[in-house]
């Protein structure tokens, strides 16, 4: 028994056993590869295309004078600032852009918000055309419609195959892809959810242009897969009733706000005329900001 007591006393005074030594050349635990570290390697492999927007797209070009670079651009800067501030408070990276009905400005808003975000340093931004029923983003940027989202979801292309980088910007684009008969069934695939999650690992913002809420269930489904939703309404066109119905269709309580499109410049800037005089000519005063 004395030998047992002696052994226990020695164990108590000796302390814990030494940790196993690291393999030669390795000091401490292995490094953790974060999403921020993976991002550059992935983005460097994306092919570039020139920024040659369609004249009918009304895309803003920040820093230029005239209607495209003045008031409307400032509105998208303001929207960008609010969203980026919100991103510091909540883990928001994926954003659905939709509207109650068609021709209310959702695609116009999605494309121009992405351009505004991409103007910031170290802010890689991706805009995706998830309106598989009536896609327009490929025409906005003068790109081919395929390969795109439908090709990836049908496992006929990889992510690197369908992403294009706009030269000179932090802007990336994914077009809709080949037409399909059953877009909602395709979006219901688990591969769609995995795709959005994977894109969020590589981009600071992933902006999805989606069909109108009251005309298809696609946006409703996609909103459940994303962090937030912006609802675009068109002044003088969208009714309060349609806005109410559209909000009620959303399954997730992630509506971040409402974007008012097509407001007249006199309504928006009458109080700030001295600051905007050099951006506008008198014959542009009643022109709407723009529409989808």
Image (tube, helix red, strand yellow):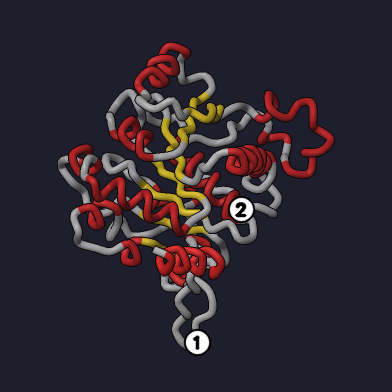
Question: In screen coordinates, is 267 left or right of 116?
Answer: right
The quadrant of the image that shows the C terminus is: top left
Of mark 1 and mark 2, the one earlier in the sequence is: 1
- Spatial CA span between label 1 and label 2: 52 Å
Residue 87: percent from left, percent from top:
58, 42
The quadrant of the image that shows the N terminus is: bottom left
Direction front: furthest residue: 2
Residue occupied by mark 2: 61
| Identity of the residue drawn at 42% across and 29% down | 99
Which is in the foreground here, disc 1 or disc 2? Answer: 1
| Identity of the residue drawn at 46% across and 54% down | 126
* Relative to 217, residue 25 above or below: below
Q: Nearer the viewer, residue 4 or 67?
A: 4
Disc marking residue 132: none
- On the image, which quarter does residue 118 sit in? bottom right
Q: Nearer the viewer, residue 246 or 31?
A: 31
Answer yes or no: is residue 205 visible.
Answer: yes
| Identity of the residue drawn at 47% across and 88% down | 24
Residue 47: percent from left, percent from top:
42, 71
* Relative to 185, residue 147 above or below: below
| Identity of the residue drawn at 51% across and 65% down | 9
Direction left: furthest residue: 181
Check contact, mark 1 vs mark 2: CB within 8 A: no
* Relative to 119, residue 287 above or below: above
Q: Nearer the viewer, residue 227 or 280?
A: 227
Residue occupied by mark 1: 25
């Amino acid at each position: 028994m004395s030998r047992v007591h002696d052994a226990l006393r020695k164990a108590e005074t000796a302390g814990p056993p030494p940790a196993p030594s690291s393999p030669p050349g390795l000091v401490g635990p292995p490094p953790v590869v974060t999403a921020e570290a993976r991002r550059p390697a992935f983005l460097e492999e994306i092919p570039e295309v020139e920024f040659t927007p369609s004249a009918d797209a009304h895309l803003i070009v920040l820093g230029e004078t005239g209607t495209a670079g003045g008031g409307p651009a400032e509105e998208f800067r303001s929207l960008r600032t609010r969203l980026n501030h919100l991103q510091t408070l909540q883990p928001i990276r994926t954003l659905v852009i939709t509207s109650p009905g068609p021709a209310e400005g959702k695609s116009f808003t999605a494309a121009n918000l992405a351009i505004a975000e991409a103007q910031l340093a170290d802010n890689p931004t991706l805009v995706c055309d998830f309106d598989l029923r009536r896609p327009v983003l490929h025409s906005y940027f003068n790109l081919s419609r395929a390969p795109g989202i439908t090709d990836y979801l049908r496992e006929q292309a990889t992510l690197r195959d369908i992403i294009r980088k706009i030269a000179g910007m932090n802007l990336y684009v994914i077009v809709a892809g080949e037409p399909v008969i059953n877009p909602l069934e395709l979006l219901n695939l688990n591969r769609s959810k995995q795709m959005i999650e994977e894109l969020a690992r590589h981009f600071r913002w992933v902006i999805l242009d989606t069909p109108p809420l009251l005309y298809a269930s696609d946006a409703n489904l996609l909103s459940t897969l994303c962090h937030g939703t912006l609802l675009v309404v068109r002044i003088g066109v969208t009714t309060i009733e349609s806005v109410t119905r559209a909000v009620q269709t959303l399954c997730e309580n992630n509506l971040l706000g409402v974007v008012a499109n097509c407001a007249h410049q006199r309504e928006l800037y009458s109080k700030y005329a001295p600051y905007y005089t050099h951006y506008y000519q008198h014959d542009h005063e009643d022109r709407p900001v723009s529409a989808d």
